[in-house]
Image (cartoon, rainbow, N blue to C red):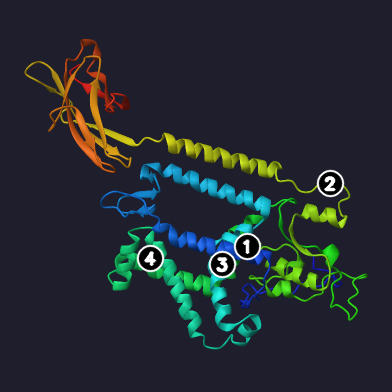
Amino acid sequence: MQPLPPDVPHADPKPLYASRTKIHPRRISGSFRKLKDVMLWGFLALYHLSPWLPWDRGANKPDQAILFDISGKRIYLFNLEIWPHDIYMLTGIMIIAAVGLFMSAALIGRAWCGFACFQTIWTDLFMKVEAFIEGDRNARIRLDHAKRGAKHAIWLMISAFFALSFLWYFGDAANQTRELFSGEIGGWSLVTFLTLMAMTYLMAGFAREQVCFYMCPYGRFQGVMFDEHSKVVTYESWRGESRGKPGKNRDFENRGHCVDCSLCVQVCPTGIDIRDGQQMECIGCALCIDACNDVMEKFGLPKNLISYDSAHNIALRSGAKKVGTLSKFWRPRTFIYGFILLATLGVTSYALHTRDLLEVNIMKDRAPFYVTLSSGQIQNAYTLSILNKSNQTRHYSIDVNATNQPSFQLIGQDDNHIRLESGKVTSLRLLVRGEMPKDAYGTLPLEITLRDPRHHPIKVEETVFNGPK
């Protein structure tokens, strides 16, 4: 390797680990701040109130619309019941969520991070508590090393409420609350409660933007999903530079519109300067737009020096691109995302509406395979395990069909009618008797059919009828 020539400066070595500089965002008002507040309170209400939505689940189940029943191995979502056998539906839901996130990134950048991510929502809520108790940015900086017991007490209460709300999704909400306050809660419920409480307190109270920087992978690869038509928070440098403090006469004729007030940095929850260009740390909350628009209005300058727009549109406004049209919603990237999203949604919906609510497992006795009766007929024995995955008790009849026209008997029952309880497995012993045709070579196909009260076939399962060769 050749050494650098003397006139080439060596880059200053950067430390491998950088200490965190605590960020104290400044309060701001504006359209994006109002939108964040709507999303904040809306998602919090959705999260905390959803477990209390009533839904009749019958006996021995909490009457909740949304319930993750660990002991019963089921997920209840209103009228939908998801069993372990239906895990493919959860896969479809995850694909829909992922592609939806990719599509939103291609259209509106990291708006999910800035407005809907739960890390952002809880951090924003904790910051509101912090500002209410300690004051705005400058006051919090002065109190940075003071004891603030009231703030941490409220943070812990919010964290506890979040953890309790999480438990509501996994059992009777009222009973979970009673057990917590009476001290009867224990086992995994207590471990889950304490873990979530501690994680919420630490992540929203202390880690904050560090979660976005280092723990969340989305910020690392989100640039791959952007193109020049993706709407992101952008500083219009062509209009803002050269920046500088305004003079007494406030003349902006021969200079940029940026007055270098640093308000865009002060309100940023991740502490970046958007004027340095698009950065991985930007979560797209757009609070810097509200701050900058306030300043532009005070100086009588056009708003949106910092805007939520695409690089393509900004290039058109700046004159960097002489010809072209404004960014469009539908383009190859969004078309592909939209197609995948609709296709996955369609396949998942079809699978949901056509899934089998009756599961039948047939286990044939193997010791012995068959028994020769005194009448000369061959008898085979089977164990039927029938799972009724619907939310209602069902009544069916059983038929057995084969080329030898066998007779059959359900052990312990007077006829071939069965009653299947909702969500339960019914086990039946079935004896099938018949002649074995000489050309069957010891094996005969056998069909076991379940019919509804109108004698319509609901489920047909195939097995074999064995006899001597």
159 left or right of 256 in image: left
Q: Which residue is mark 3?
A: 211
98 left or right of 245 in image: left
Sequence-first tag of 1 and 2: 1
> Closer to the observer: label 3 or label 4?
4
Question: Against 419, is 124 above or below?
Answer: below
Label 4: state its secondary structure: helix
Q: Does the residue at mark 3 contact the one at mark 2 (Cβ under 8 Å)?
A: no
Residue 77 appearing in the image: yes
> Closer to the observer: label 1 or label 3?
1
> Hey, which quadrant is residue 388 in on the image?
top left
Residue sitting at x 54%, y 73%: 126
354 left or right of 295 in image: left
Label 3: state its secondary structure: helix
State the image coordinates of residue 110 (x, y, percent, origin top left).
64, 58
Label 2: state its secondary structure: loop
Q: Which residue is mark 1?
A: 35
